[in-house]
C-alpha cells in the first residue's frame, strides 16, 4: 500500500472514500465537515443530534454522497472525548477505519487528518501514530492460505490530506517512519505466526543472515561445535532432546560507531516449546510456536533501527532451539553447567527459557554494554499477574527501567514493574547445584527473573516478560489474532530516545 501526503481542500477531493474524525463531546459539525453537511442536506448534523452516530472511540458510520460532492462516500470515525485523546487512541481510530475500509472493498482512501485536531501539528508523533495504526491493522498472515485473487481485498493507497502547508514536512517524515516500523512489525509477526516446522533454529539463523544484507548489519551464527567450545550448557542442554540443532544468532549493527553507547538486546528463540520431558498439556500447545517472540522482536527492531540509521551500537543475541521430549532429552534432576561456570539443577524441563537466556546474558558481558534488555515469553505466571495489557518488567537499574517505561508508554507497548527483591532469591536455591530452574508455585515471573539476575550482575539490565503480550486471542483496533510483534516498537523507541547512559 502506498501512503501519500497531500495538502489540499477536502471539498475538492474525488476520493472513493473520505474519512473524517470526530470527538464524542463535540456536538456541532465543525471545520471541513460543514461543507459536506450542507451538501448532504444536514445529514451529519441530524445523525449527531439524534444520536444515531456517537463518536465513541472505534465507532464509525459511512454515508453515500449520491454525486452531490466529488467524493463517493464519507466515513465518520469516533475518537472518544476530546480531552482524553492520546497517541494510542489516534493509532486505534486509524486502525479501525483502515480495517473497515478494506472490508468495504475500497481501494483508495483519503483521511482528512486535520479533523483529528492534532495537539502538536509540527511534531511527527501524532501523524506517525496514525500511519502506524493504519498499517498495523492491515496486517494479514496468508503464507499458507490459497486466496483467489478476486477475493483479495487490498487498499492500494492511503492519502493523508492536510490543509496547512506547515504540516506537510512532519507528516511526510511520519509516513516514512511509520512505514519502516510497520515493515519491521510485519516481519516479526510473520516469523512468530509461522509454524515451527518452517522456522527451525537453522531457518531462523538464515533469516538473520539475510537481514544482515541491510546497511550496517553483520550477522554471525554459532553452531553446536562452537557452543560446546564456549561451554554453553544451557542452550546445549535444552536442545539435546530435539533433532533440530541449536543456533546462537549474533547480530551487530553499527559496529564502527564511535563514542556511542552499546546496547544489547537478547531475545528468547524457542522455536517450539513442548515442555520437554515435563510435557505441556495438548490444549493450546500449538501456541508454543510463538516462544521465539522475543528473538523475533529483536530481529525486527534491528531491522527498523538500521533503516532509520540510528547512531547507537546495537547487538542482538538470540539463542535458538526447540524444547522436545525424546530419549536424549534433558531430564528433571539433571545438572547443567553454563558458560559462566555456574551450575543449575533442572527441576522442571519446561522452565527452559531461563536456561538458554543465562548463556546469552553471560555472553553479552563481552561487549561491555551500557545496557542490556532481554525479551522473553518466559512465564505463564506473568500472564496470570498482568494479563495481556502489559509486559512484566524487572531489572537491576532504575534509569534503564525508567527509559523502558517511557518508551512503553509512547508506543503503548506498556510495561509494569514487578519487584526483584532479595527475598525471592531464596526460592531458587538448590541442594545440589548453585541454583535450580524453578522456584515453587508462587511469584513465578519474579523467580524466573531471579534466575536471570545471576547472569547480569556486571551491567545495567532490564528483563521483559512478554508471555502475555506477544500473542492475542482476538482482533482489536490494530492487532490481529495471533502474533502482536510486541517489543519491536518499544525497542526502536527506546533507542530513538537514547541519550548517553549515565
Ligand atoms: N514458554 C513458556 C511460558 C509461556 C506460557 C509463554 C504461556 C507464553 C504463554 C515457558 O517456557 C514455560 O513453560 N514456563 C513455565 C515455567 C514453570 C515450569 C516454572 C510456566 O510458566 O508454566
Ligand atoms: Zn517451557
Ligand atoms: Zn518456553
Image: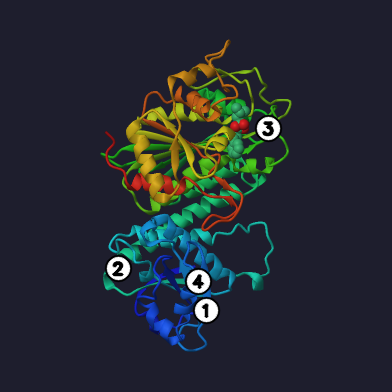
> Residue beneath label 1, please?
63
Relative vertical location of residue 192 with respect to residue 500 in this rendering, above or below: below
Q: Reading the chain from its start, which is encountered first: label 3 or label 4? A: 4
Residue closer to the observer: 162 or 501: 162
Alpha carbon of mark 1 to alpha carbon of mark 4: how far?
15 Å
Dot in front, 2 or 3: 2
Q: Which mark is residue 51?
A: 4
Q: Which mark is residue 324?
A: 3
Circle 2: element type: helix
Residue closer to the observer: 101 or 296: 101
> Residue beneath label 2, please?
167
Is there a contact, CB below 8 Å, between mark 1 and mark 3?
A: no
Dot in front, 1 or 4: 4
| Residue 118 rendering spot, x and y as whole percentages | 34, 64
Q: Residue furthest front?
A: 50
Residue name at image x 67 percent, y 56 percent: 144
Mark 4 Cα shell of 10 Å, populated few (<14), some (14-19), many (≥20) = few
Q: Reading the chain from its start, which is encountered first: label 2 or label 4? A: 4
Q: Reading the chain from its start, which is encountered first: label 1 or label 3? A: 1
Dot in front, 2 or 4: 4
Examine the rendering and report whether any part of residue 388 can be seen: yes
Dot in front, 1 or 2: 1
Q: Reading the chain from its start, which is encountered first: label 1 or label 2? A: 1
Alpha carbon of mark 2 to alpha carbon of mark 3: how far?
54 Å
Relative vertical location of residue 179 with respect to residue 63 in this rendering, above or below: above
Examine the rendering and report whether any part of residue 134 can be seen: no
Residue name at image x 57 percent, y 32 percent: 381
Amino acid at each position: 500500500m502506498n501512503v501519500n501526503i497531500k495538502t489540499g481542500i477536502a471539498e475538492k477531493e474525488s476520493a472513493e472514500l473520505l474519512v473524517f474524525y470526530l470527538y464524542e463531546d463535540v456536538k456541532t459539525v465543525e471545520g471541513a465537515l460543514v461543507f459536506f453537511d450542507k451538501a448532504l442536506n444536514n445529514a451529519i448534523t441530524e445523525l449527531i443530534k439524534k444520536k444515531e452516530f456517537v463518536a465513541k472511540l472505534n465507532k464509525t458510520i459511512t454515508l453515500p454522497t449520491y454525486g452531490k460532492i466529488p467524493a463517493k462516500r464519507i466515513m465518520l470515525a469516533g475518537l472518544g472525548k476530546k480531552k482524553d485523546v492520546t497517541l494510542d487512541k489516534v493509532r486505534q481510530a486509524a486502525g479501525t477505519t483502515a480495517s473497515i475500509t478494506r472490508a468495504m472493498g475500497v481501494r483508495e482512501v483519503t483521511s482528512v487528518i486535520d479533523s483529528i485536531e492534532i495537539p502538536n501539528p509540527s511534531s511527527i508523533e501524532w501523524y506517525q501514530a496514525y500511519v502506524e495504526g493504519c498499517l498495523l491493522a492491515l496486517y494479514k498472515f496468508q503464507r499458507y492460505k490459497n486466496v483467489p485473487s478476486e477475493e483479495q481485498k487490498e487498499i492500494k493507497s492511503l492519502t493523508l490530506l492536510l490543509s496547512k502547508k506547515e504540516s506537510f514536512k512532519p507528516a511526510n517524515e511520519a509516513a516514512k517512519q511509520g512505514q519502516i516500523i510497520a515493515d519491521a512489525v510485519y516481519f516479526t509477526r510473520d516469523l512468530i505466526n509461522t509454524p515451527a516446522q518452517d522456522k527451525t533454529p537453522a531457518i531462523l539463523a538464515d533469516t538473520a543472515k539475510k537481514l544482515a544484507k541491510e546497511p550496517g548489519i553483520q550477522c554471525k551464527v554459532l553452531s553446536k561445535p562452537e557452543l560446546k567450545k564456549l561451554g554453553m550448557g544451557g542452550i546445549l542442554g535444552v536442545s539435546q532432546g530435539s533433532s533440530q540443532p541449536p543456533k546462537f544468532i549474533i547480530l551487530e549493527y553499527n559496529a564502527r560507531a564511535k563514542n556511542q553507547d552499546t546496547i544489547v538486546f537478547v531475545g528468547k528463540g524457542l522455536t517450539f516449546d513442548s515442555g520437554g520431558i515435563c510435557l505441556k498439556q495438548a490444549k493450546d500447545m500449538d501456541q508454543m510456536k510463538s516462544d521465539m517472540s522475543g528473538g523475533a522482536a529483536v530481529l525486527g527492531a534491528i531491522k527498523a533501527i538500521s533503516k532509520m540509521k540510528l547512531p547507537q551500537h546495537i547487538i542482538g543475541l538470540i539463542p535458538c532451539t526447540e524444547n522436545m521430549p525424546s530419549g536424549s532429552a534433558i531430564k528433571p534432576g539433571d545438572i547443567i553447567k553454563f558458560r559462566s561456570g555456574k551450575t543449575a539443577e533442572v527441576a522442571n524441563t519446561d522452565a527452559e527459557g531461563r536456561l538458554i537466556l543465562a548463556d546469552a546474558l553471560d555472553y553479552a558481558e563481552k561487549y561491555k554494554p551500557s545496557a542490556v534488555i532481554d525479551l522473553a515469553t518466559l512465564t505463564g505466571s506473568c500472564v496470570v499477574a498482568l494479563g495481556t495489557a502489559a509486559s512484566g518488567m524487572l531489572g537491576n537499574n532504575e534509569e534503564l527501567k525508567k527509559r523502558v517505561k517511557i518508551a512503553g508508554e509512547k508506543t503503548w507497548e506498556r510495561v509494569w514493574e514487578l519487584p526483584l527483591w532479595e527475598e525471592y532469591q531464596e526460592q531458587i536455591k538448590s541442594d545440589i547445584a548453585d541454583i535450580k530452574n524453578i522456584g515453587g508455585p508462587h511469584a513465578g515471573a519474579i523467580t524466573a527473573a531471579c534466575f536471570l539476575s545471576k547472569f547480569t550482575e556486571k551491567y545495567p539490565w532490564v528483563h521483559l516478560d512478554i508471555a502475555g503480550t506477544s500473542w492475542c486471542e482476538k482482533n482489536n483496533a490494530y492487532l490481529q489474532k495471533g502474533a502482536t510483534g510486541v517489543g519491536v516498537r518499544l525497542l526502536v523507541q527506546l533507542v530513538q530516545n537514547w541519550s548517553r547512559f549515565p
